[in-house]
Amino acid sequence: MGTVYDIFIVNSLWLLCSLPLFTIGPATAAAFYALAQRLLGEGRTVSGDFFSSVKRNFKQGVLLGVPLTALGLFLAADIWLCRRSGTGIFTFFMFFFAVIFLFWCFVTLYVFPILAKFELGSREILIRAFTLSIRNLPMTLTMLLVSGICLWLCHIAPGLIFIMFGIAAQFCTTIMLSIFRPWLPKPEPADEGTDIPDSGESSVNHSYEDFDESSFYGDDPEAVRKLLEESYSREKRAGTGEIRNE
């Protein structure tokens, strides 16, 4: 019952915080963060983790969420209009917009989980979201399929809206954590006689030097060099690690 209750709470909080529409970005990132903390055994309560993430990622979540939502609505409207307009050139444009919409789904699926767990700029988040979605294509398609089924069930039975997003988010979070595992902090073994911190959070954060950029971008040395230089410059200014684990 604990799992079902947590999913219901996250689903309800996401619906509530998404009502203004422009806040759907930080709300989605918060839903992933709360469920991820629960699955990792590092969170306190899902509601506390949810609002902590909303507060931390609000500005960047809005800046990412508003354009992505507007683009998704624009593409969906174009596909619908082309389908209603008949055959010929409209069929071509319908498939053209459908392909763009598919890639939009790929990117959007990863953007907010990356925002929730990593300290990155918006441009880097978008690039990594696209890269990870292609590198993990079978898992990406599986997550889209399950999300689409949940959306279809909500269309058939509108009352399911109070639980279906949470179920889809739980499923996608489990897969996302397996994809992110190489970059998530691992607790260091404690020496004998040393107390292990019990704060509900991991005590280790990855620094920029520990972060393997090449696993995101392949073997392009120039791209890796540029990103490492940017990371070093940002670390020198901020003096902080890259992984979000608050």
Image (cartoon, rainbow, N blue to C red):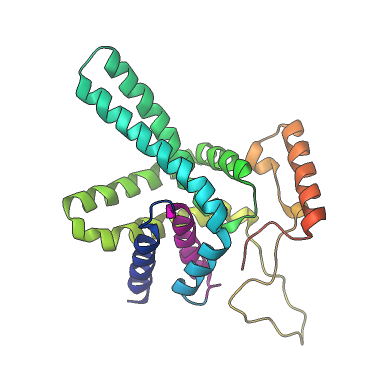
Using residue 218 as the reference point, say whether residue 179 is left or right of it: left
- Quadrant of the rendered image containing residue 88: top left
Residue at (45% x, 58% y) in the render:
27
Answer whether residue 30 is magenta in the image: yes
Using residue 30 as the reference point, say whether residue 21 is left or right of it: left
The location of residue 187, given as percent across then percent down, is 67, 69
The location of residue 166, given as percent across then percent down, is 35, 61
Q: Main secondary structure of the magenta part?
A: helix
Residue at (80% x, 48% y) in the render:
233
Looking at the rendered image, the quarter that the N terminus falls into is bottom left
Residue at (66% x, 36% y) in the render:
218
Report the residue that reaches farthest toward the left: 156
The location of residue 28, given as percent across then percent down, is 44, 56
Residue at (35% x, 28% y) in the render:
98
The location of residue 72, given as percent across then percent down, is 39, 38
Magenta stretch?
A: 23-43
